[in-house]
Image (cartoon, rainbow, N blue to C red):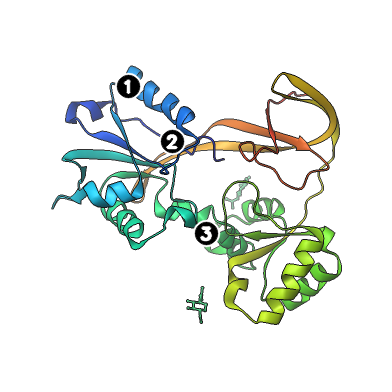
Amino acid sequence: MYFLKTFVLTNKKLSLFSAVVLVVVQAEERYMYDQYWITVALREMYGVTTIRKTMAEIEAEGDLRPDGTLVINGRPVAIVYFRAGYSPADYPSEAEWRARLLIERSSAIKCPSIAHHLVGTKKIQQELAKENVLERFLDNQSDIENVRKCFAGLWSLENDIIVNSAIESPELFVLKPQREGGGNNIYGDNLRETLIRLRKDGSNETAAYILMQRIFPPASPSYLVREGTFVRDNVVSEFGIFGAYLRNNDKVIINDQCGYLLRTKAASLNEGGVVAGYAFLNSIFLT
Ligand SMILES: *[C@@H]1O[C@H](CO)[C@@H](O)[C@H](O)[C@H]1NC(C)=O
Ligand SMILES: *[C@@H]1O[C@H](CO)[C@@H](O)[C@H](O)[C@H]1NC(C)=O
């Protein structure tokens, strides 16, 4: 999900208005080259210019015109594509929050919009998994049941019964902070100790975590290739679908799938994440 965030561009007329695509990046950007791939495609296929700015630069150089157009150094911005802004580290000061507010107040197409950004967060997944919440968003009972079947158990740390079970059997749970990418989840003894500490502190830090039922997918033997060498191992995979979604207020213009990402890791590893160094890119083989 973090490799290529949902990205939609249908307006070939952008170049006529000399508006640009603004890619929001981190100051030290390790994904620079896959971002350049998109930049080059936009330029070569659509004649669209891309500019790259950090949140701090956007706050320093950005402005809103009275009609809501976001301008950076005088250039109108058609689309803001967030490749940063998903982690607290991306908001080291109030300046970055002001930049986010500036973007959200503008008429530029945001990829993702703040609503779409939030709906992907673990906290919202946890809310959606509560009783009678899906019913607020879907009418069709069979759709509701199908969606609910896909949910793993998700609980807040206010749920004492679940917290007690997790302290007793940490291997059946994952403790997740509200973060993106690999390397943040808490497992096993660490999970137990963290829950005990949080409970003792009585701290409001509990709100920062969710407890999730641990999923045990079937493992199968495979070869993992890295830097020209390979190992044979038992592996598990995670299958993700890319979505393309474009709307103008209530009018949905595109809502479609546009490819997939299959990530595979050794079954013995807790952590996933390709860039984090745990998982490998893979492709589907239907049998
Ligand atoms: C609900 O959705 C299912 C498909 O998921 C469809 O077959 C059925 O007709 C729908 N029911 C209603 C009442 O719209
Ligand atoms: C947690 O508590 C501290 C100190 O009481 C407070 O400053 C902070 O805003 C609280 N955080 C949340 C998320 O409620």
| In the image, residue 124 above or below residue 164 | above
Mark nearest the camera among 2 and 1 is: 1
48 in relation to 199, above or below: above
**Residue type highlighted by circle 3:** Phe
Circle 3 crowding by C-alpha within 10 Å: few under 14, some 14–19, many from 20: few
Q: Callout 1: few (<14), some (14-19), or many (20+) C-alpha neighbours within 10 Å?
A: few
Question: Circle 3 is placed at which residue position?
Answer: 137
Q: Which numbered disc flags the more N-terminal residue, 3 or 1?
A: 1
Name which residue type carries label 1: Arg
Please identify the residue farthest to the front as the structure is shown.
28
Tag 2's secondary structure? loop
Q: Please name the residue shown 35% across and 18% down the image.
A: 45
Instruction: Kindly report which numbered mark, 3 or 2, lies closer to the viewer in this rendering.
Output: 2
150 displayed left or right of 137:
right
Indicate the quadrant containing the N terminus: top left, top right, bottom left or bottom right: top right
Circle number at residue 7 = 2
